[in-house]
């Protein structure tokens, strides 16, 4: 029977360190290549809906390393270090990396599933010729700062041609794992307000569900990707707990 024990504490364990470096390199490459050659790496490596002409299978992984701006990458990487170093020190590099990428993959699959139903709803109200125009010319319109006047066509265009990016899905998976394994550890909101990890996870998850369901106009956050990372993290930890004698929590 395989057992898992804490592997020793490191401020910056190897997988977390390499993830931080890779994310930083992708961010710098996005800025540098965009400025030097006019190539938008976000469009190429961000995750597009499966039915989009811009979709490529590798985007299921590369989307996790793309970020929109400095604040986006900073807060994701801070959370990766904050929760990831504890989990990697406890699980070890191999199990931590497995967890990180499975939750990141699960996050985007949930988000694409939600997009599927949103796309079906928008398409139901549109004639075939408009749908064809969206698929053929919609990306070009967005690049020119334009969109369709018809609200369903405009929404369909955004769903097909706007990529999902960021490590947030995997990071929310780490948050979920931290809350399950160290439920009474204190997390300081704004570095000042203490709250137990288990309540922080429940509160944050409830907020993400509320904002995802409410679907507020102008909200470009992939809330269901965050929830997907938490869901897959929960299922993976439960699965591991059933397979090994030494429970994780």
Image (cartoon, rainbow, N blue to C red):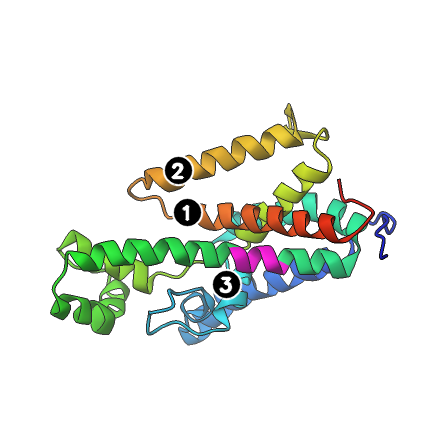
Which residue occupies 14% across, 66% down?
130
Question: In what element is the residue under mark 1?
Answer: loop
x and y, in percent, of residue 65 in the image: 55, 62
Instruction: Tell me whether the residue at label 1 lies in contact with that at label 3, contact meaning CB atoms closer than 8 angstroms.
Output: no
Query: Is residue 190 in view?
Result: no
| Marked residue nearer the N-terminal end (3 or 2) | 3
Name the front one of labels 2 and 1: 2
Q: In this view, does 152 lie to the left or right of 171?
A: left
Residue 18: horizontal and vertical position, in percent?
70, 62
Can you identify the residue that label 1 sits on? 221
Q: Which residue is drawn at 65% across and 49% down?
A: 80
Q: How far apart are marks 1 and 3 (CA)?
A: 14 Å
Give the mark toward the camera: 3 or 2.
2
Indicate the secondary structure of the residue bearing disc 3. Answer: helix
Instruction: Point out residue 51 in the picture as x, y percentages from the top left corner.
Output: 33, 69
Crowdedness of circle 3 by 10 Å Cα count: few (<14), some, many (20+)?
Answer: many
Is 185 on the left or on the right of 122, as rendered? Answer: right
Q: Foreground residue, 73 or 237?
A: 237
At 24% from the left and 70% from the top, the residue drawn is 135
Q: Is residue 105 part of the magenta span, yes or no?
A: yes
Instruction: Kindly report the distance in space between the C-alpha atoms of the residues bearing marks 2 and 1.
Output: 9 Å
Do tag 2 and tag 1 residues touch (Cβ < 8 Å)? yes
The mark that comes first in sequence, 1 or 3, is: 3
Residue 118: percent from left, percent from top: 29, 53
* Secondary element at image label 2: helix
- Cα–Cα gap, marks 3 and 2: 22 Å
Q: At 44% from the left edge and 45% from the top edge, which residue is drawn?
A: 223
Q: Mark 3 points at which residue?
A: 63
Q: Is residue 206 above or below residue 7?
A: above
Instruction: Look at the magenta stretch and give its main secondary structure.
Output: helix
Label 2 sits on residue? 211
Q: What stretch is highlighted in magenta?
A: 101-106
């Amino acid at each position: 029977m395989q057992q898992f024990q804490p592997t020793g504490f490191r401020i910056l364990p190897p997988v977390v360190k390499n993830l931080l470096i890779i994310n930083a390199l992708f961010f710098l490459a996005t800025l540098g290549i965009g400025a030097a050659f006019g190539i938008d790496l976000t469009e190429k490596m961000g995750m597009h809906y499966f039915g989009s002409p811009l979709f490529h299978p590798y985007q299921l992984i590369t989307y996790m390393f793309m970020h929109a701006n400095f604040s986006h990458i900073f807060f994701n990487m801070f959370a990766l270090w904050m929760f990831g170093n504890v989990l990697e020190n406890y699980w070890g590099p191999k199990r931590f990396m497995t967890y990180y990428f499975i939750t990141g993959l699960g996050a985007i699959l949930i988000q694409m599933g939600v997009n599927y139903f949103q796309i079906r709803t928008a398409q139901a109200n549109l004639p075939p010729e408009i749908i064809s125009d969206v698929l053929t010319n919609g990306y070009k319109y967005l690049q020119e700062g334009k969109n369709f006047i018809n609200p369903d066509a405009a929404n369909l265009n955004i769903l097909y041609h706007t990529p999902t990016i960021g490590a947030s899905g995997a990071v929310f998976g780490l948050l979920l794992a931290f809350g399950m394994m160290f439920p009474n550890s204190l997390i300081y909101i704004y570095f000042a307000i203490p709250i137990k990890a288990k309540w922080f996870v429940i509160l944050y998850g409830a907020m993400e569900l509320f904002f995802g369901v409410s679907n507020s106009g102008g909200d470009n956050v992939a809330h269901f990707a965050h929830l997907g990372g938490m869901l897959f993290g929960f299922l993976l930890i439960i699965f591991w707990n059933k397979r090994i004698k030494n429970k994780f929590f």
